[in-house]
Image (cartoon, rainbow, N blue to C red):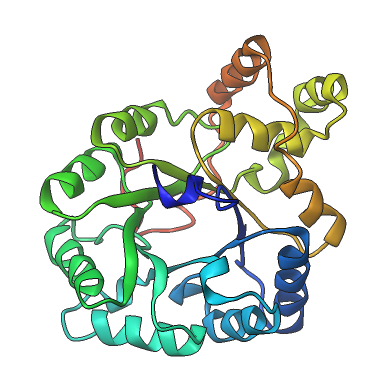
């Protein structure tokens, strides 16, 4: 079982693009709500602020799961491990729980960064390793390349985007998916079906979307600065969508709405 489906880690709190006081307040509210998984990245520029905020929550280190990601700018052999060591200093921890490659290497040669990721684990800088934004083919290559378990591939995942090829790769490789942009940055609210289904369960459209992701076998990351939304996003474990409703929502993936496109991120791979 992946670490993200242990304890309450399947509902993670993301920190992008928060900084400074809004970030601190959001993390404190998330911890008070019950979140015990927190996600950041070198690229976000907020690791130090995230570490400071987590220190203020009063949570013991073994009470929460902390994920960060290595920026592609630090993939070189001379920069990778020092950058992770700096992340640990900024986050005020001896090791993170999960260290991800934020993106596959832009030149398509995955081996160097995968090897360095494995070295980070061997040196005790992280308990687990994973991927982010890897295609199905890249997931299979990473599984063949690495000798240690790969606990996740964090990708854009929501009901408006068909990620069936990644789900198939997850089954084939044993690398579970984790979602970001879980409500497509609000795009799901333009579709009445989610609120309509939610009304039957006494839940909001966002809660229906998040529950659908979880029932698909994908862990979730959500972000908000509003305490009421932080709490609502966490409150998705007391109902189960019917198979009919799961199928109705699943049909929405034909919409084909992608938030993080190659137009937005030029070095992104050719997505499935």
Whether residue 54 is situated above or below residue 148 in the rendered picture: below
Residue 73: image quadrant is bottom left
Give residue 103's quadrant in the image. Answer: bottom left
- At horizontal 75% and vertical 39% (from top left) the residue drawn is 206
Give the quadrant of the C terminus. Answer: top left
Comparing 265 with 205, the one in front is 205
How many numbered tags mark residues here?
A: 0
Q: Is residue 170 left or right of residue 79?
A: right
Return the x and y of residue 229 as percentages of the image width and height: 81, 53
Residue 36, relative to residue 271: is it above or below?
A: below
Q: Is residue 101 left or right of residue 53?
A: left
Q: Position of residue 89 (x, y in %)?
A: 44, 90
Please state the horizontal and vertical placement of residue 114, each as a whole percent of the image: 19, 61
Residue 183 showing in the rendered view: yes
Q: Position of residue 25 (x, y in %)?
A: 78, 75
Does residue 189 appear in this view?
Answer: no
Q: Nearer the viewer, residue 227 or 103?
A: 227
Query: Eyeballing the image, is 54 above or below 36?
Result: below
Looking at the rendered image, the quarter that the N terminus falls into is top left
Residue at 53% across, 75% down: 61
- From the viewer's perspective, tell me whether residue 247 is left or right of residue 78: right
Residue that appears at 23% across and 45% down: 138
Q: Residue at x 59, y 48 (%)?
A: 181
């Amino acid at each position: 079982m992946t670490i993200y489906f242990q304890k309450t880690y399947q509902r993670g709190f993301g920190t992008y693009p928060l900084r400074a006081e809004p970030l601190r307040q959001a993390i404190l509210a998330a911890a008070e709500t019950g979140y015990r998984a927190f996600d950041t990245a070198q690229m976000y520029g907020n690791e130090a602020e995230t570490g400071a905020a987590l220190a203020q929550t009063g949570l013991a280190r073994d009470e929460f799961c902390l994920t960060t990601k290595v920026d592609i700018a630090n993939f070189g052999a001379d920069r990778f491990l020092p950058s992770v060591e700096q992340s640990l200093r900024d986050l005020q921890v001896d090791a993170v729980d999960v260290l991800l490659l934020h993106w596959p290497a832009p030149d398509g040669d995955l081996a160097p960064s995968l090897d360095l990721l494995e070295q980070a684990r061997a040196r005790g800088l992280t308990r687990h390793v994973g991927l982010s934004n890897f295609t199905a083919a890249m997931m299979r290559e990473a599984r063949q390349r690495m000798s240690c378990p790969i606990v996740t591939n964090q990708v854009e995942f929501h009901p408006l985007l068909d990620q069936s090829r990644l789900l198939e790769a997850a089954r084939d490789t044993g690398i579970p998916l984790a979602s970001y942009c879980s409500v497509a940055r609000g795009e799901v609210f333009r579709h009445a079906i989610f609120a309509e289904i939610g009304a039957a369960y006494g839940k909001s459209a966002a809660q229906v979307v998040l529950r659908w992701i979880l029932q698909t076998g994908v862990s979730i990351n959500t972000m908000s600065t509003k305490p009421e939304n932080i709490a609502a996003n966490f409150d998705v474990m007391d109902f189960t969508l019917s198979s009919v409703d799961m199928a109705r929502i699943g049909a929405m993936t034909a919409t084909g709405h992608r938030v993080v496109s190659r137009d937005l991120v030029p070095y992104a791979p050719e997505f499935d």
